[in-house]
Amino acid sequence: MKMTIVINENQKRSLIVEGLSDKIAQNTKELFNITKNIISNSSKQTKLNLEFLLTWGASIGGFMGPLNQYLNSEYPELSTTDSALILTGVISILYYDNKETIKQILETIKEKGLGNQFLKVLTKGKELKQVFLDFLSSLNMAAHTMSNIMSYTFIVPILPMIYNMAQSGNVTPDDVSKIVDRLMGFGFLTISGNALKEFLQRIIKKFSN
């Protein structure tokens, strides 16, 4: 005998939100792993301890992911280690202000003859950063109100998911709380739960209009 399971709209909505939360959380976890692997490769080449960059959690992955795709499309002949070195150089400049460390990374890039590729990706990284800053401005989140703008860049690759969620109907505060709890549970983010909740609410409001 075939059974038919009937669920109401609230149950259906709950399943959709939980499924989306899992996807977003998994994506964020992958961003952290991307960062970890790239930094590990670069550390071996530069002989520097670059693990301090991991304190940014998944935020760096939010930029490394798109930049890595761009780098692979522009220079498919590059090895994984060369790509990792270039990306680390770009991210160090965008996220970190220790001139001595950056100088040593750039010297290794130059020694390996990767200067032109590095400059091209750095330009793309700065463009991406400006687009992100403009997006934050459209949310009425002024730079000076945030502890560090770059802590929020983890959101870049998952914006399409959030957009689809916002377009599917009214998103409740409870829905947002579930997503925040799921993301914070991994421990890969460097912002507070309250800051993340406000951030997501502003994004959803923008995408819903």
Image: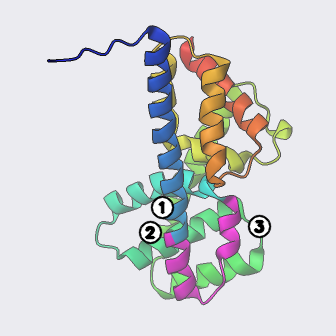
User: Which sits in the foreground, 70 or 44?
Assistant: 44
- Answer few, some or many: residues within 10 Å of disc 2's Cα (few below 14, many 20 plus, some between 14 and 19): some
Residue 116 visible somewhere in the drawing: no
Amino acid on which disc 2 is placed = Gln
Amino acid on which disc 1 is placed = Lys
Residue 97, x across and y down, in percent? 77, 67
Q: Is residue 145 above or below residue 103?
A: above
Q: Is residue 113 left or right of residue 110?
A: left
Secondary structure category for the residue under label 1: helix
What's the magenta region? 37-56
Identify the image quadrant of residue 71: bottom left
Look at mark 3 in the image and give the residue it sits on.
Answer: 97
Return the disc, 2 or 3, that comes first in the chain's sequence: 3
Q: Residue at x 85, y 39 (%)?
A: 144
Instruction: Indicate the quadrant containing the C terminus: top left, top right, bottom left or bottom right.
Output: top right
Amino acid on which disc 3 is placed = Asp
Q: Nearer the viewer, mark 2 or mark 3?
A: 3
Asked whether the residues under the numbered discs 1 and 2 touch, taking CB atoms below 8 Å apart as contact, a structural biologist would say yes
Look at mark 2 in the image and give the residue it sits on.
Answer: 117
Residue 34 visible somewhere in the drawing: yes
Residue 63, x across and y down, in percent? 55, 53
Residue 152, x across and y down, in percent? 67, 44
Identify the image quadrant of residue 171: top right
- Answer few, some or many: residues within 10 Å of disc 3's Cα (few below 14, many 20 plus, some between 14 and 19): few
* Disc sitting over residue 120 in the figure: 1
Q: Is residue 170 above or below residue 202?
A: above
* Disc sitting over residue 188 in the figure: none
Return the disc, 3 or 1, that comes first in the chain's sequence: 3
Q: Residue furthest left?
A: 1
Q: Residue at x 49, y 71 (%)?
A: 37
Q: Is residue 97 above or below residue 196?
A: below
Instruction: Indicate the quadrant containing the N terminus: top left, top right, bottom left or bottom right.
Output: top left
